[in-house]
Image (cartoon, rainbow, N blue to C red):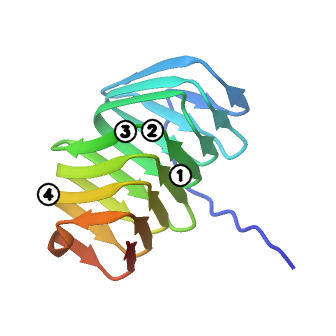
Amino acid sequence: MLGLKLNAQNCGTCTSSVNNSDTSIVVVNAGQTFCVDTMGVFNGRITVNGGSICVKGMFNPQSFNFNSGVITNSGNMTLNVSALVLNSGSSLTNNQDAILNLNGTLTIAGGSFANNGILNIDVTLNANSGALTNTGIINCTTVNGISNIANTGNVNSN
């Protein structure tokens, strides 16, 4: 028997919400929260300039520019970028039962990343500085800076 478990997550107050299929162009500035609800599917273009993204549904943007801010994934997120860099002032949380697919490299460079779900990185995980906590599963090709990872989960690399 195949089952699906949905965990209720709170996004707080949303400045704008996606409740169905959306392909719009979005800019999320400081003080704003862009939410993808449980039944939402976002395939548009997004730039984050200090604001927050909260995903409970599907998030697979055509283009993704992350300058600073907060990302919380409680759903299914796919980022088709060559590199995602979390600088100081940036954080990303992949919650329990969430899936984050990154089709490139993830670099923690002063920001923070917490993985409690499944993280799939096509290329390299660079844990240079900042905070990386893993209680879930990380799958990647290469890991640099493994000693900088607070790991009680699994890190699988080639």
Mark 3 or mark 2, earlier in chain:
2
Q: Which mark is residue 128?
A: 4
Give me the C-alpha separation between circle 4 and circle 3: 17 Å
Q: Which mark is residue 91?
A: none
Question: Which residue is label 2 attached to?
Answer: 53
Question: Which residue is label 3 attached to?
Answer: 82
Asked whether, in this view, residue 119 is left or right of residue 85, the answer is right
| Relative vertical location of residue 110 with respect to residue 62 in this rendering, above or below | below
Mark 4 or mark 3, earlier in chain:
3
Between 90 and 145, the one lying in front of the other is 145
Give me the C-alpha separation between circle 4 and circle 1: 31 Å
Mark 4 or mark 1, earlier in chain:
1
Asked whether, in this view, residue 113 is left or right of residue 119, the answer is left
Give me the C-alpha separation between circle 4 and circle 2: 24 Å
Quadrant of the image containing the C terminus: bottom left
Amino acid at circle 2: Ile
The residue lying at 45 percent from left, 38 percent from top is: 53
Q: Residues within 10 Å of mark 3 (few under 14, many from 20)?
A: few
Quadrant of the image containing the N terminus: bottom right
Q: Which quarter of the figure has residue 149?
A: bottom left
Amino acid at circle 3: Ser
Give me the C-alpha separation between circle 3 and circle 2: 20 Å
Question: Is the C-beta separation of discs 3 and 2 under 8 Å?
Answer: no
Residue found at the far top of this picture: 25
Give me the C-alpha separation between circle 1 and circle 3: 30 Å
Question: Is the C-beta separation of discs 4 and 1 under 8 Å?
Answer: no
Mark 3, secondary structure of its residue: loop
Provide residue 93's location: percent of width, then percent of height. Answer: 39, 56
Mark 1 or mark 3, earlier in chain:
1
Q: Which mark is residue 10?
A: 1
